[in-house]
Image (spheres, rainbow, N blue to C red):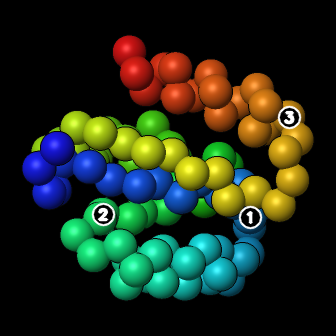
Amino acid sequence: MEPGKRALVLFAHGARNAGWADPFRRLAVELGEKLPGERIVLAFLELMQPSLPECAAALHADGVRELRVVPVFLGAGGHLKTDLPRMVDELRT
């Protein structure tokens, strides 16, 4: 796929405290340095923006046609086992 048509979405839980996302922002920057040409963005399950659907819609509007969603949760609880697969299926449609 041509450059600019793919993106990697780091998908995190979200929190009320804005500083909570700082490590994920740093991760996105560091990944961007290691993966030149790869578009890397953050999306959140709740309490922070953008949500995964909002992020996907914005990327699609910008010409992205292939998304890879990488969960950045500390544990594989219900959100990763149930919510994320449902959300990804919805994005595919």
Q: Residue 39 bears which disc, if any? A: 2
Left or right? Give the position of 74 relative to 26: right
Q: Type of residue at label 2?
A: Arg
Q: Residue at x 11, y 50 (%)?
A: 2
- Which is more N-terminal, label 3 or label 1? 1
Crowdedness of circle 3 by 10 Å Cα count: few (<14), some, many (20+)?
few
- Going 41% across and 63% down the picture, which residue do you hit? 41
Residue 54: x percent and y percent? Answer: 41, 43
Q: Is residue 30 above or below residue 62?
A: below
**Circle 3: element type:** helix
Front: mark 2 or 1: 2
Q: Circle 1 — which element?
A: loop
Q: Is residue 51 above or below residue 81?
A: below
Residue drawn where x is 29% and y is 65% of the image? 38
> In the image, what residue type sits under mark 3?
Gly
Q: Quadrant for residue 15, please give it.
A: bottom right
Q: Which residue is mark 3?
A: 78
